[in-house]
Image: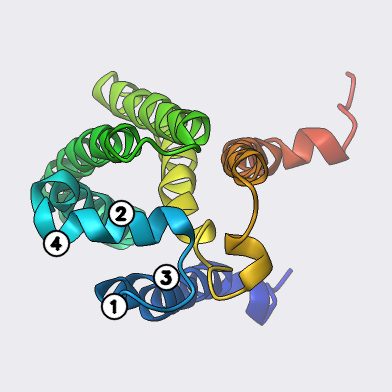
Amino acid sequence: MEQSWLQKNKKILLWTVMGAMALWVLVTSEIPLMYPSGYYSEYRAHLLNHVHSNIWVVLPHFIFAPLALLLGPVQFSSRLRRKYIDWHRLMGKVYVISVLVGGAWALGIAIYDKSGVIVGTWTQVSAWYVTTIAAFLTARNGHIAQHRQWMIRSYGVTFTFILLRVLDPWPPFWNMSVPQFTLTIILCVFAVVALPDVFFNWKELTTKRVRS
């Protein structure tokens, strides 16, 4: 049966949507961090004050977390992986290092800033570490199918740093209470880790096993 246009281009469409979301966050949330006025939450405005006098506190996170975000689409390219396998492995190691450093500094920022969403940050970073280390170990042990699944979960957690900023321009979002935003973080992390499993097991979920 011939595939529809949507089936043929679903990966391109997915990356296009994700890229558009990342660009939106860059323009509406990250670039305006350079200015002290706007639609920041109190936490982000407070963090901004630290950036100018203590840039070392946030610089590693600002470097390594976006690096992990940018490496994901390249690592998922089957064509590049087959053609440049050594490069793929090297970039995979860079991705793991970026996650470890970016996650550690995200926790450090939350602790340094005495953030009320420390529980949400712990949840986010813990999921990031677990899925990424699992992806690394399955690759090292030669379980490529499982490695790809864990990488999808890992990059899903990586992308929560975009998902949790998409609605920043909407006042009801950044005016949420600390418990509400903490719950939002936890639910977002749960969704990006759990939904890939629904996709991986869609056939088993939607069809009955044929008994011989």
Characterize the local packing of mark 3: few (<14), some (14-19) or many (20 or more) Cα atoms within 10 angstroms: many
Residue for badge 2: 47
Q: Secondary structure at mark 2?
A: helix
Q: Classify 139 as above or below 10.
A: above
Judging from the image, the colouring scheme is rainbow
Mark 3–mark 4 Cα distance, whole angstroms, equals: 24 Å
Q: Secondary structure at mark 4?
A: helix
Q: Position of residue 110 (x, y in %)?
A: 35, 38
Which residue is pictured at 78% across the width and 33% down the height?
Answer: 204
The reply to whether the C-beta atoms of the residues labelled 1 and 3 are less than 8 Å apart is no
Mark 1–mark 2 Cα distance, whole angstroms, equals: 12 Å
Amino acid type, callout 3: Ala
Question: Looking at the image, is mark 3 or mark 4 earlier in the sequence?
Answer: 3
Q: Left of 209 or right of it: where is 45?
A: left
Residue for badge 4: 52
Question: Looking at the image, is mark 1 or mark 4 earlier in the sequence?
Answer: 1
Mark 2–mark 3 Cα distance, whole angstroms, equals: 21 Å
Question: Looking at the image, is mark 1 or mark 2 earlier in the sequence?
Answer: 1
Question: Looking at the image, is mark 1 or mark 3 earlier in the sequence?
Answer: 3
Label drawn at residue 22: 3
Amino acid type, callout 4: His
Label drawn at residue 35: 1
Amino acid type, callout 2: Leu
Residue 77 visible, this angle: no
Q: Secondary structure at mark 3?
A: helix
Question: Looking at the image, is mark 2 or mark 3 earlier in the sequence?
Answer: 3
Question: Looking at the image, is mark 4 or mark 2 earlier in the sequence?
Answer: 2
Q: Position of residue 187 (x, y in %)?
A: 66, 40
The reply to whether the C-beta atoms of the residues labelled 2 and 3 are less than 8 Å apart is no
Amino acid type, callout 1: Tyr
Residue 148 visible, this angle: yes
Q: Position of residue 79 (x, y in %)?
A: 30, 61
